[in-house]
Image (cartoon, rainbow, N blue to C red):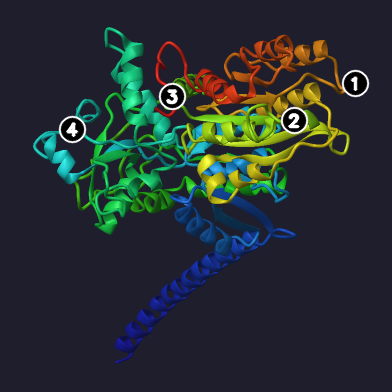
Amino acid sequence: MGRHSSVKSRGRRARTPLIALSALLVLALIGWFTYDFLADKLRASSCDSTTVLNVTASPDIAPVVQRTAAALSSEDTCYEVRVSDEESEDTTESLVVSDGSEPPDVWIPNSTIWLQRGQARGAFDSPVTGTSIASSPVVLALTQDAAAQLGWPAKQLTWADVLNSALNIGMPDPAREPVGVSVLFGVRDLTKAAPEANAAVTTELRRLSANTQSSVGDLFNLLPGGGEDDDPLDGFPVSENGVLRNNAKQSTPLVAVYANPAVPALDYPYTMLPGARGKKREAAEKFLTVLMQQNTADALADAGFRTPDGEMLRKRGTSELTSASKVTPAEIPQAADVDDLLNVWAGINLSGRVQVLLDVSGSMAEPVPGTNTNRLTLTLQAAQRGIHLMKPSTKLGVWLFSTKLDGDKDYQELLPVLPISEQARTGGLDKLNTVRALPNGATGLYDSVLAAYQSARQNYEPGRINVVIVLTDGKNEDPKSISRDALLSELGKLQDPRHPILIVGIGIGPDVDAGELQAISGATGGQAFTADDPTKIDQIFYAALSRVLCQPPDCKQKAGS
């Protein structure tokens, strides 16, 4: 018995160190995990204050960015990332023309093209670049009926199939939509091999310009069942992400036709703006790192975006409507190349940025023989009729000038530069009917022309014909203004061949100095038109508009025809 007892005792003694060792191991593991957890918490809280990072993102990608920001802010109390959504065009305008609000620290537009435009217009103190966090190829989206007419789904459609067909294709204004810019490059590439490549580009872009709308959103309203069925569209350019979001609603399913060769995609550049310094810069860099992680890439894929190099990480249920194949985007074009094509488009589409400088000096109140009205009224009537020749997307602004209209300034803004459609909707055009000549006001021509031209230069818009139209019945009468030679010299310094701005002078009545007006206009490559008989102002005004809005030799019709 004793021997058996001794054996059991040794077994217990043998197990005791093992149990103790196991217990120590468990305690060690618990301690290690506890330390790691606490260390993470300490690292997350090792800051004196919370750094707030303000991010503005394009509305289509903003929801994913917002969810990622919320996750980071909850995990790391050193940072609070606040994300707002805003159309990229609106953000560009607010950065160029400050409205007093605080600019974002980070901007995620839908395309690098917006960075180029902001840079060209002086929005940034120093050059800016962005890191693409996603992409979405630009496609030609067709209704299923339209695609079937071209042989889909048995045939894989191409852009050439669509553009060479008789389908009714819409077009977003490329001056406002990078999607439209991609189409310009696509058309250029498809017509390179044509015997007369320039003529082929012009012909195709003219056809597309017939159904131009301000934005892609407006084009969706022109689909069958979109509420405007008089002449519904068969399709239009849009991002693939836009097609996926539309098809998820199952309203009017669209078929995506992909470009080959590739065109620039929407590339969503994460851009740290120059104002983000110090801790904000650190926060911006950390947030970019988070956005580039796999879980965020998965969230972007779930939202219908591709990777920056064009991979589709999620297959779609309606696979016959879109492609899951990799779509490697073309490189984002240089700003100069974009401007060149936008200038071609502007000449074809007859869309402009028009700043009118209207003389309201006392002589404009003089009666016109043979009429019951004065020079100013006839001029305004001609201007209003001329405005109707312009496309609604043309931007128009009006300054009045005489002498000392605004303190010591000879000029004063009547209408800010806005699309004509918006001027009409908000009653801006009605203000023209309230304009009156200034009794005893002289003609402060030189200072007013220079100020208007400087404003036009500062706010130059690629893709539009930028022009200053001067309407006057006299010559400079302000002895305190700059001299004529100084004006011409300053105008010369403001010239930029890649970003032309014409001055078109329109002289009314026998008191106009035609030579002076031509010298001013000619300094910018523009032209002066004069009407000794004010009743002929209509003819002169239309001739001037044709010179402004038509680019010879292509444009043989009057503006708006």
Q: Do the residues labelled 3 and 2 touch (CB within 8 Å)?
A: no
Label disc, if present, on residue 288 of the rendered structure? none
Give the quarter of the figure containing the C terminus.
Answer: top left
Label disc, if present, on residue 157 of the rendered structure? 4
User: What x and y, as percent, mark residue 44?
Assistant: 62, 60
Q: Which amino acid does label 4 sit on?
A: Leu
Q: What residue type is labelled 1?
A: Pro
For marks 2 and 4, give the one nearer the viewer: 2
The span from disc 4 to disc 1 (Cα, nearest Å) is: 68 Å
Give the quarter of the figure containing the N terminus.
Answer: bottom left
Q: In this view, does 302 lie above or below 479?
A: below
Between discs 2 and 1, the one toward the N terminus: 2
Q: Which amino acid does label 2 sit on?
A: Glu
Determine whether the residue tagged by mark 4 lies in a helix, strand or loop. Answer: loop
Q: Going by the picture, which residue comes out furthest to the front? A: 370
Residue beneath label 3, please? 345
The span from disc 4 to disc 3 (Cα, nearest Å) is: 26 Å
Q: Do the residues labelled 3 and 1 touch (CB within 8 Å)?
A: no
Q: Do the residues labelled 4 and 1 touch (CB within 8 Å)?
A: no
Between discs 3 and 1, the one toward the N terminus: 3
Q: Going by the picture, which residue comes out furthest to the bottom? A: 1
